[in-house]
Amino acid sequence: MSTHRYGFATKAIRAGEQPDFREGASGDVVVPIHLSTTFARKELETPTGGYDYTRSLNPTRKALETKLAAIEDAGYGLAFASGLAAETSVLLALLKSGDHIIAFDDLYGGTKRIFDQIINAYGITASYVDAADSENIARAIQPSTRMVWIESPTNPLLKTCDIRAVAAVTRHNGLILVVDNTFLSPYFQHPLELGADVSLHSATKYIGGHSDVLGGAVMLNRQDYYERVQFIQNSAGAVLSPFDSYLAIRGIKTLAVRMEQHQKNALAVALFLEDHPKVRRVIYPGLESYPQHALFKSQASGFGAVLSFELQGAVADAKYFLERLEVFSIAESLGGVESLIELPSVMTHASVEEATRHKTGITDTLIRVSVGLEDINDLIADLKQALE
Ligand SMILES: *Cc1c(COP(=O)(O)O)cnc(C)c1O
C-alpha cells in the first residue's frame, strides 16, 4: 500500500499490515507475531519470501518498520532493541574513527554517555554547544566534524532548537543532522521534512505508549544511509524482537488519539500550575509564556505532554510534595498512559555536577511531569491536595 496520500491515523493503523489472501493464507487483519528464528526454503538457493534468519529480516519487525516509515513520511524505517541501541547503530553506521560530533548541551543523559564513555574509545569525539542558537553550531565546526546531534524539545528544560536553521548549517557544510524526536513522537513533528538526515526515537516512550515495551526507531530518506544503518542492524544485531515489534505496532495504532489527549491534559495541568502560588515557574511549550512558543509552532504541529515546573522552597519541599501524590507515580521515563513525575536533581540528572545543573537551570526543586491519560479532574485534584 503506497500510503503517502493517507492521513496520519490511517497510516498508523493500516501501513505494513495487509491481509494475506493467497491460497492457504488466513487473511489476518493484525500481523501475526512471527517467533520463528529461521525460515525454511523449498529450493536451496531461494529464501522463502526473502526471509532466511530473524536477525536479518522478520515479518513482524518488517511490518513495524513499514509502519514507522509511513507515519513519519520517511523513505525507510528500522526498529532496534532500545532507543540507545538505535543511537549506537546510527553512530557505528555513519561515522568512523577521527570524526567529530557537535551535540546539544542539553541532551538525554544516555546519549551523552554513549558519546563520552563508549565511542570516544574508538576515536570519535563530541563537543557540546547550546544549539538553541544555530550560530553556536556553525562556530563549533572543525575540519573533522561529520555530524550534528540535537533534540527538540530538550529534557527537562524543554528548550527548542530551530531545526530548519540547524539543517541549513549542516547542509551547507556537508554534515549529517540527527534529530532525537522522542518527545514529540511522529504525530507532532517530522524532522526529515525540516531538513534532518536521520530522525530517531526511543519507541519505549510515546510510540509504544504503555510503558511495556523497550524499543528504538530510526527513520531516514537517503538510501545509502539506510543501507549502512541496516547493515549495522543485522551485523551488530541490536534488533527488536518479534513480540516487542508487535507491541510497538499495537501502540502506534492509537498514537494519534493518545497524543491529542496527552496534549489536552498537559495544557490543563500547565495552566493549573502556572496559577498556583506555590509554583515559581512552569515550562511547557504550549503556554503563551514559553519563550520560544512561535518557533516551536513553526516546526511542530503540537506541544507534546512533558512539562517542567519549579516549586517555591527547597529540595525537601519538592520531595514532600512528590511523596504526597496519589495518582501520579514517582518514576523516570515518559510517554506512557500513566502520569509520571520525577525530580531531575535527585533522579534522572543526579549524576550531573551540582554547579553545572544550577547553571543550566536544573534547580533543586525543578520537577518534570509526563502527563498521562487519566481523568484530568483527578490529575488536577491530586496536584492540588499535594501542593496544599
Ligand atoms: C528514553 C530516551 C532515550 C533512550 O531510549 P531507551 O529506549 O531507553 O534506550 C533516548 N532519547 C530520549 C529523548 C529519551 O527520552
Image (tube, rainbow, N blue to C red):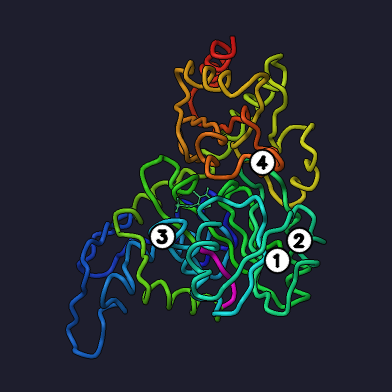
Q: Quadrant of residue 165?
A: bottom right
Q: Earlier in the sequence, mark 2 or mark 4?
A: 2
The local secondary structure at tag 4 comes to helix
Task: Check disc 1 and report its element: helix, strand or loop.
Answer: loop
User: Where is mark 1, residue-wise?
Assistant: 195
The residue stretch that appears in magenta: 218-222
User: Which numbered circle lies on residue 164?
Assistant: 2
Q: Amino acid at mark 2?
A: Arg
Which residue is more in the foreground, 7 or 368? 368
Residue 128 locus on image (x, y percent):
68, 59
Q: Quadrant of residue 287?
A: top right
For the residues labelled 1 and 2, the Cα–Cα distance comes to 6 Å
Front position among marks 2 and 3: 2
Q: Main SS type for the magenta part? A: strand
Q: Are marks 1 and 2 in contact (CB under 8 Å)?
A: yes
Number of marks in picture: 4
The residue labelled by disc 4 is 355
Q: Earlier in the sequence, mark 2 or mark 3?
A: 3
Of marks 4 and 1, the one in the foreground: 4
